[in-house]
Image (cartoon, rainbow, N blue to C red):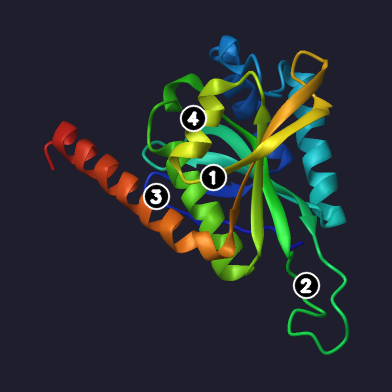
């Protein structure tokens, strides 16, 4: 798929490319202890391989990877992506037959550097991506998975309105190289208006807090 850029108030999501390697390495190195349950590349070689694999997936049409850029200072503070993008085999004559855009997708490979934790960055990234998925691509479902041990990630997904579907056993390789159990969440198209309202409200609160801190 063609690279896309998503513009927010606090962050921009820009197409991930090889020029981001040094900044992503620095972002990941700020506090590696944050990524106990997340597959975050450690070391320059690992970051370069991570980017190369993400670009290969994009060229294959199965992922759209981003670098997360903080607007206030232009710093690259992490990464995220759409992936597992499925196009269903709709029959001839069906309204969705022949679409170039995905019918369903997953959001994941999401991580932020230490200074961006507990800021509006993750909330706005999810808002921008979900808005694009449901309103531009008109997907039917967005999935999110997290390590069954990662309670912080589970709470974050539940806060934005993700619905818990169950546990997928031995689902993926974990960050500590075991077969992890994954908690599976999803948001479907009919739920997007309520999820959107929740995210807009959370971002409005973040804007108010920022204004109070800066005296705007």
Considering the numbered disc 1 on the image, is that residue within a helix, a strand or a loop? loop
Q: Reading the chain from its start, which is encountered first: label 2 or label 3?
A: 2
Question: Measured along the vertical axis of the image, is residue 215 above or below residue 149?
Answer: below
Q: Secondary structure at mark 2?
A: loop
- Answer with left or right where residue 31 lies relative to residue 66: left
Looking at the picture, how far across and down is residue 176, in whole percent? Answer: 76, 13
Whichever of labels 3 and 4 marks the residue nearer the N terminus, that label is 4
Q: Upstream in the sequence, badge 2 or badge 4?
A: 2
Q: Residues within 10 Å of mark 1 (few under 14, many from 20)?
A: many
Which numbered disc covers residue 100? 2
Q: Residues within 10 Å of mark 2 (few under 14, many from 20)?
A: few
Q: Is residue 65 visible?
A: no
Q: CA distance from mark 1 to mark 2?
A: 26 Å
From the viewer's side, name the closer residue of 212 and 189: 189
Taking the spot 65% from the left edge, 65% from the top edge, the residue there is 139
- Taking depth in this image into account, of 35 and 152 the one nearest to the observer is 152
Q: Which residue has dot 1 on it?
A: 162
Q: What residue would you read off at disc 4?
A: 155
């Amino acid at each position: 798929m063609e690279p896309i850029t998503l513009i927010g108030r606090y962050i921009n999501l820009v197409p991930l490319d090889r020029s981001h390697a040094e900044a992503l390495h620095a972002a990941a190195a700020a506090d590696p202890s944050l990524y106990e349950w997340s597959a975050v590349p450690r070391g320059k070689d690992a970051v370069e391989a991570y980017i190369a694999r993400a670009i290969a997936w994009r060229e294959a049409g199965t992922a759209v990877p981003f670098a997360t850029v903080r607007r206030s200072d232009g710093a690259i503070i992490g990464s995220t992506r759409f992936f597992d993008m499925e196009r269903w085999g709709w029959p001839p004559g069906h309204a969705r037959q022949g679409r170039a855009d995905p019918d369903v997708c997953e959001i994941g490979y999401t991580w932020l550097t230490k200074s961006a934790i507990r800021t509006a960055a993750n909330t706005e990234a999810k808002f921008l991506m979900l808005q694009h998925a449901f309103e531009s691509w008109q997907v039917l479902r967005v999935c999110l998975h997290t390590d069954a041990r990662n309670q912080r990630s589970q709470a974050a997904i539940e806060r934005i309105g993700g619905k818990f579907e169950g546990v997928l056993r031995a689902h993926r390789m974990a960050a500590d190289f075991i077969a992890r159990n994954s908690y599976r969440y999803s948001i479907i198209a009919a739920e997007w208006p309520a999820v959107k309202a929740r995210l807009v409200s959370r971002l409005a609160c973040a804007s108010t807090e920022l204004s109070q801190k800066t005296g705007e």
